[in-house]
Amino acid sequence: MKNIKKENQTFESIKHIDENGFEYWYARELQDVLEYTQWRRFDNVINKAKISCEKSGISIIDHFADTGKMVQIGSGAEKEVNDYKLTRYACYLIAQNGDPRKEVIALAQTYFAVQTRKQEITEKEYSMLTEDEKRFYQRDLTRKGNYSLNQAAKNAGVKNFDKFHNSGYKGLYNGETADDIAKRKGLRYREDILDNMGTDELIANLFRISQTEQKLRKDNIQGEKEANDTHYEVGKKVRKAIADIGGTMPEELPTPEKSLKQLEKENKKMPKK
C-alpha cells in the first residue's frame, strides 16, 4: 500500500495559488500524479468529469478553465498543448471518474473530499450569515449532494433521471412532482425550483438527497423501479419526520421573493469596493 500522507503531499505540492489567493491545479500535472501516461486517456476522464459537473447544474467554466502549456518536442523546439486550470471540485470530479483500479485514484478521491470538507464553514460562521447567504450555502450543498446521488442512482441502473428525482419529490411533497412545485411557486418554464427555496426547504431536500444516496449504496439497490421506490420512500420518511417534530411541511414554506440567480445578477452589478 502506498503511504496516504505521501500521496497527499504530492497532491498538495502541485497546487498553485493565483494572485487573488484562489487555489488551482493544472490538469497536465494532475495527470502525472494520477499515473495516466497518455493525455488522450486522461482527457476522456476530464470530459466525463465536465459532464458530471454540468448535470449537477454547476457551471463548467467556473471549474475547468481552458489554458495552454508550452512543451519541448525535441531539438529545443516547443509547441503549445491543451491544458486546464482546475478547482478543487474539478479535481474531485476527475478522481470520481478515474480508473477505479488505480490505487492512486482512491487516494485522490479521499484527499480532495477531505480537503473540501475542511473548507466548509463552521457552525458559528454559518449562524452569522444572512438568510440569502445561507440559501447560497445550502444550495451549493444540494448541488454536490445531487451529483453524488446521481452517481449512486446510475450505479443502481437508473436511466430516466427526471422520473427518479420526481419520485423523491413526490414522497417529500405529498405527491407533487418538480413541475407541480414549480407551478405552485409561480416559476417560469424550466426555472430551477431549488434556486427558489428558502433555507429550511433546502435543508429538507438535502436530507432527502443524502439519505437516498446512502440507502442506494448501503443496500446495494439494483433496478430502476427499485431505485425510484427507494427515493420515494426516503422522501416520505423525511416528510413524516418533519410532521413528528411539528415542523412546517415543505410545500407550506414561503418562496423567497428573489431566486438565487436574480441575487447573483444583482451582486455582479454592484460596484466593487
Image: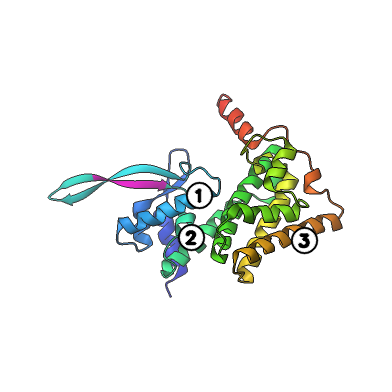
Q: Residue furthest top?
A: 271
Inter-mark Cα distance, 2 to 1: 11 Å
Name the mark on residue 53.
1
Q: Which residue is mark 3?
A: 237
Asked if the stretch drawn in magenta spans residue 181, the answer is no
Q: Which residues are magenta?
A: 80-85
Inter-mark Cα distance, 1 to 3: 29 Å
Mark 2 or 3: the one toward you: 3
Is residue 138 visible to the viewer in this orientation of the structure? Answer: yes
Percent x, y of residue 237: 77, 61
Percent x, y of residue 123: 70, 51
Question: Does 255 sit left or right of 115 as displayed?
Answer: right
Give the mark, 2 or 1, whose residue is nearer the N terminus: 1
Instruction: Give the answer, above or below, for where 165 lies relative to 233.
Output: above
Question: Hey, what amino acid is under mark 2?
Answer: Gln
Question: Does 50 sit left or right of 188 as displayed?
Answer: left
Please rate how many residues cluster around mark 1, counting C-alpha atoms within 10 Å: few if below 14, some from 14 to 19, many from 20.
Answer: many
